[in-house]
Amino acid sequence: MEVIKDEKIIEDLMKKLNYVFDFKNTGTPGIEYVMYDDSVLNKFLSYYDFLDQKETEIMELTGESLSHILYTKYYWQFRFNKRHEELYGEDEGLEQQLSLIIDDIDQRAEDDITLSIKILQEIEEGKI
């Protein structure tokens, strides 16, 4: 399974769906994101938020499956976590976020795809 890892594709989708990253409006009441001094962290966070908030619209526009979008969310959260760790050290809350995405994949994946540890490992090893 491929994930949407090309930043140009993500940014084109963001434009087509009129998405604007708002760290105070995450789509989850009571949750606000932290804005970072590092533009790469903010970019990765915006990609994750976009995928999280617009997953249905992305599927309708691209024809991608829910499974594809869920693994793509994991990819961008993992990239965010790695960058965050490089700059600030480990953060258990971010690791928890990855676990929540894994649970989401396990519960919601479709197309007869069950949670694939292999796909997650390939993302973490940089093979995807």
Image (cartoon, grey):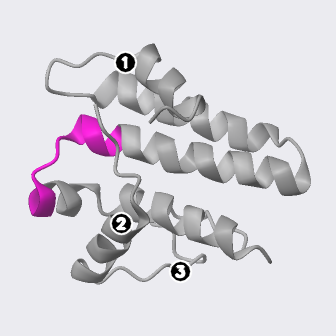
Identify the mark nearer the N-term, 2 or 3.
2
Which amino acid type is shown beneath numbered disc 3? Answer: Asp
- Mark 3: which secondary structure? loop
Q: Which residues are magenta?
A: 60-70
Predominant secondary structure, magenta span: helix
Q: Label 3 belongs to which residue?
A: 22
- Mark 1: which secondary structure? loop
In what quadrant of the picture does the C terminus appear?
top left
Q: Quadrant of residue 115?
A: top left
Q: Label 1 belongs to which residue?
A: 115
Residue 102 % position (x, y): 48, 28
Residue occupying the point 76% across, 73% down: 38
Residue 6 % position (x, y): 39, 59
CA distance for labels 3 and 1: 31 Å
Which amino acid type is shown beneath numbered disc 1? Answer: Leu
Q: Nearer the viewer, residue 73 or 11?
A: 11
Residue 63 % position (x, y): 9, 52
Identify the mark nearer the N-term, 1 or 2.
2
Q: Is residue 41 left or right of residue 120?
A: right
